[in-house]
Image (cartoon, rainbow, N blue to C red):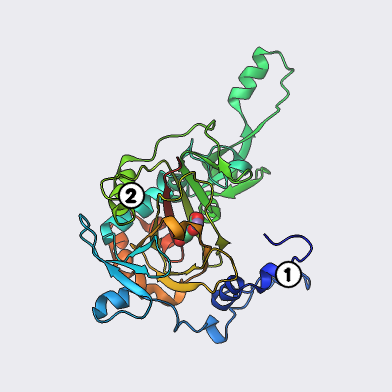
Amino acid sequence: MYGASDPTAAERTAFRCAEKQYKLYKPLNLKGRSRSRSKPSGGEGGGADLSAVVDFHALLAADGELPAGIGRRDCAGFDRPVFCFLDRPGFYFIPGALSTAEQCCWIRESLKTFPQPPNRTNLTAIYGSISDLLIAAENQKILVEAENPDIQERNEQNNCGGKMEYKYFKFVDSESQKGEEHRSTAATTLVRKLRWSTLGLQFDWSKRNYDVSLPHNKIPDALASLAKKMAIPAMPSGEEFKPEAAIVNYYGPRDMLGGHVDDMEADWTKPIVSISLGCKCIFLLGGKTRDEVPTAMFLRSGDIVLMAGVARECFHGVPRIFTESDQQEISALISQLSSGDDVFILDYIKNSRININVRQVY
Ligand code: OGA
Ligand code: MN
């Protein structure tokens, strides 16, 4: 949209200004080669003015008159309160759609099973398929580069002189590597480096499309039925949402998702069902161009957002997640995870956010 002739134009848009207003961290000062941590922006303690951020939980609790531009919908066959913006048809907000137990279940799945092959993650391009990453992290394993036994066998069969053409990585006990010179990475570090995983039809980020030739499993039944149920407010009556793909985003304290439009699915009348887990964030919903001033709203663990129709064509993004200072926001989640043997997951989610967005591709 913004050509190379004016690379700064995108920086001046209303959407970009809102992102700057809300984001917690300034980018690292690369010019000065400073290696110090970036300081929170927006005044002391990163205290950006949050007074304009729409808080649907507060509206739900107040049960009074709604602010201008916000509506509440009662949907046949749907037993939860649903909010919408009158000028963004197709956008629906379902506050507290998931119980604490359901949130715990989806957080666990997001870390344990969703990154499992054949699902691809941002780590796949670097390390190839990695199985059981969460179990390896819980058991303090480390990932080391190794000779691929399959390739060795094949090379031997083909009489290739034992030359290894492909690298492969495997988890080993950290103890076993003491004194070894292999390049290694702790599994706990890798979980922190997880940025996305893809379920169902695999999305190819480099080509920005779905690559149906990539091996994939269908969307897990429990996630598909949750998405079908939650999509009801955004579906024509009698029609059922068909979950075919999902992108799972993992956000650490410094991560954000820049403004974008999800335009790779064939039918934009079908909603994206977007589930929030873990730390609270600010979500920006803009218009069809970056020049429209976006509306900011809080998204909390257990909230679900639907984007269909006109809202599918709107820029949106996540400029900020709230971690250290807002632990009371996820206190129910923390206490539920504390009671089990989920120490690693508890530690992870205290300063992370996970977003599962489920899509009908065709
Ligand atoms: C996306 C997206 C929003 C979120 O993955 O396309 O818009 O809440 N995610 O993380
Ligand atoms: Mn999106």
Q: According to the image, label 1 marks what residue?
A: 8
Task: Look at label 2 and name its amino acid.
Answer: Ala
Circle 2 residue: 227
From the top left corner, tell me how far across and down residue 282 is, in percent.
46, 71
Residue 259, labelled with which disc? none
- Please give the name of the residue rendered at 20% of the width and 60% of the height, measured from the top-left corner: 79
Identify residue type, mark 1: Thr
Residue visible at 67% across and 59% down?
A: 1
**Visible residue check, residue 178:** no
Location of residue 203 with respect to 277 vertically, above or below: above
Q: Is residue 155 left or right of residue 112?
A: right
Nearer to us in this view, 263 or 216: 263
**Residue drawn at x 46%, y 66% as measured from the top left:** 351
| Rendered image quadrant of residue 209 | top right
Dot 2: what SS? helix
Question: Residue 18 is drawn in which quadrant?
Answer: bottom right
Q: Residue 149 at x, y = what percent? A: 59, 25
Q: Nearer the viewer, residue 128 or 97?
A: 97
Percent position of residue 138, x then y: 43, 50
CB at mark 1 closer than 8 A to ligand 2? no
Using the image, determine if residue 193 lies above or below residue 40. Answer: above
Q: Is residue 170 toward the left or the right of residue 101 in the image?
A: right
Q: Is residue 200 above or below residue 26?
A: above
What distance separates the C-alpha of mark 1 from that of mark 2?
A: 39 Å
Judging depth in this view, the residue of 153 and 213 nearest the camera is: 213
